[in-house]
Image (cartoon, helix red, strand yellow):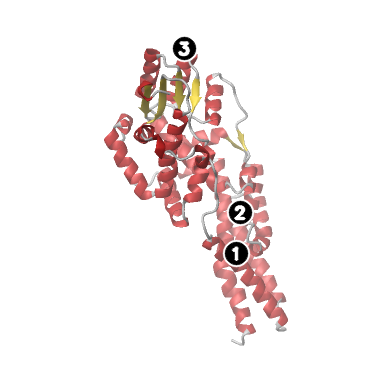
Amino acid sequence: MKRECLTIIGTAHVSADSVEEVKDAIYEQQPEVVAIELDRGRYTRLKNEMAGIVEDDSISVTQIIKDNKVGLFFTTTLLSYFQSKIGEDVEVKPGSEMVGAIEACQDLQIPIALIDRDIGTTLQRALNKMGFMEKAKFMYGLIISALGFGEEEEVDVEDLKNPDNIDDLMEMFKDEAPSVYEVLVHERDAYLAGKILQIPQDHVIAVVGAGHQQGIEKYLDNPETLPPLHELEKIDSNKGIPWLKIFLALIPILFVVIFFLAFFNGINITWNIYEFIVISMIMGFIGSILSGSKIQSAIVGGVVAPLTIIHPLLAAGWFSGLTEAKYRKVRQRDIKNLSKINGFRDLWNNNIFRILLVVIGTNLGVSIATLVILPSKVFIPLFMKIFGG
C-alpha cells in the first residue's frame, strides 16, 4: 500500500451523507482495494442481510451464563441499543455506509479488505482492563441513558464528523472511562492502521469511523510506533491481584470455619445450620421473584442459594437465569427491538432485559443474605458463643 495512494474516508455510522460520500469516492477513484471497518462476523451478517438470507437469530442465553459472559453480553446489548436508537432517529440504519461500500465494490468487482478487530475481543479486552469502580460507573451511565434519564440533546449526525467535535467527544470519553477509551479508540486506531499497512495493493480507499481517522493517520505517518497486531488480539485476564474476588471468597470460608469451630467446641449448631439454609433460600427466592422471574426460576434460585454461598465460584443467579431462559427465548430481534424502547414498560417486555434482571436480582438477594442477614443472625452469635461473648 502506497501512503500517497491511500484515501481515508471518515464516516458517521448513521449518516445518509456518509453513504453517498463513500459510494461516490469508490465510483470516482475505482481503487484496487476498499478497506472497511468490519470484522469477519459483522461482514458476513451484513452480506446475508443484503442477500435476503434469513439466519437463525436465536441467542443461547444458557451458554452466555455458563461461559460467565453476562457482563460482556450486557455491554454489547446496550451499545447496540444506542447505535440502533440513533439510527432510527435519523432514519438511517447503522452500518449503511459499509453496505454502500460493499454494493459499490460488487458493482465494480473491487476486492474488499476487512480491517477491524473481532468485536468480542475488543469488548472483552475493555472489560478486562476496567477496575470495579470504572465498570460500575460505565454501566451506570449506559443504563441511565438507556432508561431515558438525564439530559437529552439534539445532535446533528454530520457534526460528529467535524474534527473539532470529535476531539471534544474523545476527550470527554477518555475522562469518563479511560480504560474503555484505550481499547475502543486508541487500540483500534493502531489495529486498523496495521491492517491497512498489510494490504499489498497500492491504490486503497479505507472506510472508517470518523473518530478513528486522525489516530489512523498518525500511525500511518509513524509506522514504527505500531504495536504488534497479535498483541492487540490477545485476551489477557491477568490484571494483578483480584482483591475483591479474594475478599468475596474469604466470606464463605469464614462461615465454614465458624461452623467447624463451634462444632469442635461442643456447641449445638443444628439450629444454626437450619437458619443458614432457610435464610439463604428465602433471600434467593425473594431476589429472583422481585426481579420478575417465573416461579420455577425463583424456586431454583432459592434451592441452590445455600450451596452457592459456600462455593465462591458459583452464583445463584446463574441457575435462576438458566431456568428463566428456558421460558423466555431470546433472539437477535430482541436486540434490534431495543431501539424501539421508550420507557421502562417496553424494557420490561424485552426478554433480554428480563433474563439479565433475574440473574442480577437473584444474586443481589443472596448477597444481602451473605453480607447482612447471615452474619447478624447466625455467624456473629456463633462467634460470640465460641469465644465466650
> Of label 3 and label 1, which has the lower sequence position?
3
Residue 91 position by quadrant: top left
Real-space Cα separation, disc 3 to disc 2, in angstroms: 53 Å
Asked if one can make out residue 153 in the rendered structure from this viewpoint, the answer is no
* Label 1 sits on residue: 249
Q: Residue at x 43, y 23 (%)?
A: 1
* Label 3 sits on residue: 108
Crowding around mark 3 (Cα neighbors within 10 Å: few <14, some 14 to 19, many 20+) is: few
* Label 2 sits on residue: 317
> Of label 3 and label 2, which has the lower sequence position?
3
Q: Give SS at disc 2.
A: helix
Q: Nearer the viewer, residue 78 or 345?
A: 78
Q: Residue at x 68, y 80 (%)?
A: 262
Whole-percent x and y of residue 211? 36, 35
Real-space Cα separation, disc 2 to disc 1, in angstroms: 17 Å
Q: Nearer the viewer, residue 360 or 103?
A: 103
